[in-house]
Image: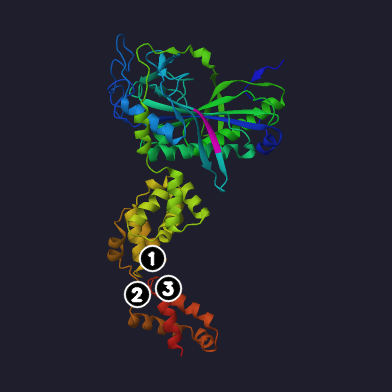
Amino acid sequence: MTTPVSSPRLVDYDDAIARFDPVLGIEVHVELGTASKMFDGAPASFGAPPNAQTTPVSLGLPGALPVINAAAVEYAIRIGLALNCEIAETCRFARKNYFYPDVPKNFQTSQYDEPIAHDGYLDIELEDGTNVRVEIERAHMEEDAGKNSHIGGTGGRIHGAEYSLVDYNRAGVPLVEIVTRPITGLGERAPEVARAYVQALRELFRTLGVSEAKMERGNVRADINVSLRPSPDAPLGTRTETKNVNSFRSIERAVRYEISRQAGVLDAGLAVVQETRHWHEDSGTTSPGRVKSDAEDYRYFPEPDLVPLAPSREWVEEIRAGLPELPGARRRRLQDAWGYTDAEMRDAGNAGAVDLIEATVAAGADPAAARKWWMGELVRTARADGVALEDLAITPAQVAELATLVASGRINDKIARQVLAGVLAGDGGPEEIVVARGLEVVSDDGALISAVDAALAANPDVADKIRGGKVQAAGAIVGAVMKATKGQADAARVRELIMERVG
């Protein structure tokens, strides 16, 4: 008989994949961007002082009765339709019973066997263009819990803490939880698929306008279920659930770690424990949480204080007709309009640059120039600074202004990079910086002829080579002129003048 154990050792990832078949299940929670909470009128905004946004309903006080938030229902239907789900003709809420300090009612109002949306799918594209279809089992509505803060311990954990505080501002904020069916046949690409799926969902939430979808705020949180089996035709293995992973990089790392860890457990002839696990960003590891409950352990029963919900077919079709252009269709349209290759469009999407490029083109930039600056200097700067591309201190309008300055010949690429650095440093807009620093390209023939003559006089051997037919030697003179003019000369005109001056 095997004994449950956390992990005797890690197995090399490639070795684990060679001997086991990984299966994923992903549960994504998205906080809906409604003005008020799921079942009461308390504000649902972010950043208020602790416990400032509560009512008797969200605090679970006796006699307080919930009322369903109509906007939250509409948002849930939008999500279900965008995920190609069936929208239930009737559904209801249930009480999910568990006892945590951040759940003031000692139960969570959720949906169990009657979700609002079910049986859908989402097609995702990996970085190399491979398409993967993820089957959606359900998307159901529920309320968020409050937030525990453990004081005096390490890493915000309860272990070793001196005391804990609870903020109920988040309690009752509307959520939609999206649950996949087992995702099989992934092999070594399981971590990549998990990351791409959650990325695609976040993009979808933003497109639909149902959430700010800021992972750093916890607007989008992913629970990653991983199990291993000896072969694709074997029964599913015992799963673990790594809770509340809230960055794309961490999702990928958590899947890789769990595959290696579970392979070590199985190699030792021991049993994987069905449990929740905590993700540790600093060490790239998971640790045990609690033994994972099955549905029956929550003692679900219908919520007696809420009537069943029956969205009319007319309302559902009205919502469907009002859906915005979805991300996949939008990317195809923009790619055609911009003339990007598949690889260029995919890279822009992976970098989170599509919206920024679109806004830059709308501000007057050529699509090729917009891609060049966002996917070149700005992506490198964002990565070096460890920030999202959209959080850089530059706007699409400023990038378009920079591209226009280059296209008009007023500045060249080298100067443009200086200007870009000035904008990012907060020194002003591109035009303002060019004028203030005197950075315009020198195209006046008088000034250029003087600089060319000086360079030829200083390099008579190079001049002789040019006269002898070695025109490539002109590059040395161009370089000397560019140095003398601090990179502000019109290089093409300088080359023409060199050929004229040497006869």
Give the residue type that dot 3 points to.
Answer: Lys
Up-down relation of residue 134 to residue 344 (above or below) = above
Q: Label 3 belongs to which residue?
A: 483
The image's mark for residue 160 is none
Q: Residue at the spot x=38%, y=52% of the render?
A: 358
Residue 157 in sight here: yes
Q: Label 1 belongs to which residue?
A: 415
The residue tagged with tag 3: helix, strand or loop? helix
Q: Please tell me how crowded label 1 is: few (under 14), some (14-19), or many (20+) other residues with Cα within 10 Å.
A: some
Mark 2 / mark 3, whichever is N-terminal: 2
Can you give x and y, in whole percent of width and height, for residue 271 in the image? 67, 20
Mark in front: 2 vs 3: 2
Give the residue type that dot 1 points to.
Answer: Ile
Q: Please tell me how crowded label 2 is: few (under 14), some (14-19), or many (20+) other residues with Cα within 10 Å.
A: many
Mark 1 / mark 2, whichever is N-terminal: 1
Q: Please tell me how crowded label 3 is: few (under 14), some (14-19), or many (20+) other residues with Cα within 10 Å.
A: few
For the residues labelled 2 and 3, the Cα–Cα distance comes to 12 Å
Closer to the camera in the image, 176 or 228: 176
The residue tagged with tag 1: helix, strand or loop? helix
Up-down relation of residue 442 to residue 460 (above or below) = above
Q: Residue at the spot x=37%, y=71% of the render?
A: 488
**Stretch of the chain drawn in magenta:** 133-137
Q: In this view, does 126 lie to the left or right of 167?
A: right
The residue tagged with tag 2: helix, strand or loop? loop
Considering every residue shown, the one lying at the far front of the view is: 314
Considering every residue shown, the one lying at the far bottom of the view is: 503
Can you give x and y, in whole percent of width and height, for residue 196 in the image? 52, 40
Quarter holding residue 310: top left
Up-down relation of residue 306 to residue 324 (above or below) = above
